[in-house]
Image (spheres, rainbow, N blue to C red):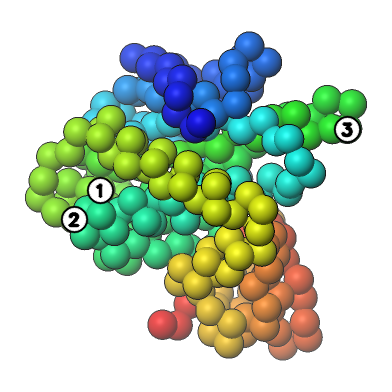
Amino acid sequence: MIGEKIIHLPITSSTNDFLKENWNIFPHGTVVVADVQTAGRGRFNRPWYSPEGGLWFSVLFKPRKNVKPNFYTKLCAVSIVRALKHLKIDAKLKWPNDIYADGKKLAGILTETIFKEEKLVAVIVGVGMNINNDIPEELNTKATSLKLLTNVEYKKLSVLSMILRQINKALKVYSKKPEALTRVWKNLLMQKEGQLVCVRTDDETLKGEIIAINEDSITLRTDRGLTSLTSLEIIGFQT
């Protein structure tokens, strides 16, 4: 049961780091939530501003089957979107795992793995969601919060409970049919096949048409032909 054990930390470097250091002493489904993170991070190791008022938590999964780690990323992303619907917030996913509302980033997900003798023994999914926290001025055009979207102050643990309920429901449904979860995840993406996008990779910026959206890659048609990218950031696209 996800969330049967919840560990609350007033302050920590990051909830992901806490679980990476202690995964072996906690059971599957353990959730760590912090009031403040001093070294929160997102994709590409970018800092994630994590002050008081936001929801910063990580979930520990210990796979019993040979499941791809991104199954748990998609599981959490889809569950968050479904939980937000109960708050009357129409959220979408920006490939691969950012949660957007009203055209701005509301939450992000960072998944990390632990292997032992080449066997996957733990998957840690970290979630950072802006709830009641202030958004720094330099991020006003890019990020939002639940409070900004609805003008309502939320109880963070109530929002967490809603998300965990959705994760547990989705885990029951999709653990035996991960391909169905991929279809749901793909349907929630802001990006669609056939769209023109601008993406940033490790060493260049590319423009092209999305030919295929896969679990862990996007195939683009650029002026150089087809290219499959696994490490990229979508920085612009046509709606």
Q: What amino acid does circle 3 point to?
A: Glu
Furthest residue toward left: 151
Tell me: residue 204, above or below residue 61. below
User: Residue sitting at 55 percent across and 53 percent down?
Assistant: 173
Q: Choose top left, top right, bottom left or bottom right for residue 226.
A: bottom right
Tell me: residue 196, above or below residue 67. below
Q: What amino acid does circle 2 point to?
A: Leu
Distance between the alpha carbons at the discs numbered 1 and 2: 6 Å
Q: Are marks 1 and 2 in contact (CB under 8 Å)?
A: yes
Residue holding disc 3: 118
Distance between the alpha carbons at the discs numbered 3 and 2: 44 Å
Q: Earlier in the sequence, mark 1 or mark 3?
A: 3
Q: Which mark is residue 4?
A: none
Q: Earlier in the sequence, mark 3 or mark 2?
A: 3
**Foreground pick, 158 / 212:** 158
Q: Dot 3 surroundings within 10 Å: few (below 14), some, or many (20 or more)? A: few
Q: Give the percent coordinates (x, y) of residue 39.
A: 47, 26
User: Residue sitting at 59 percent across and 16 percent down?
Assistant: 26
Tell me: residue 119, above or below residue 171. above
Residue holding disc 2: 149
Residue holding disc 1: 145
Q: Quadrant of the C terminus?
A: bottom left
**Foreground pick, 162 / 147:** 162
Q: Dot 2 surroundings within 10 Å: few (below 14), some, or many (20 or more)? A: few
Q: Give the percent coordinates (x, y) of residue 31.
A: 47, 26
Of labels 3 and 2, the one closer to you? 3
Distance between the alpha carbons at the discs numbered 1 and 3: 39 Å
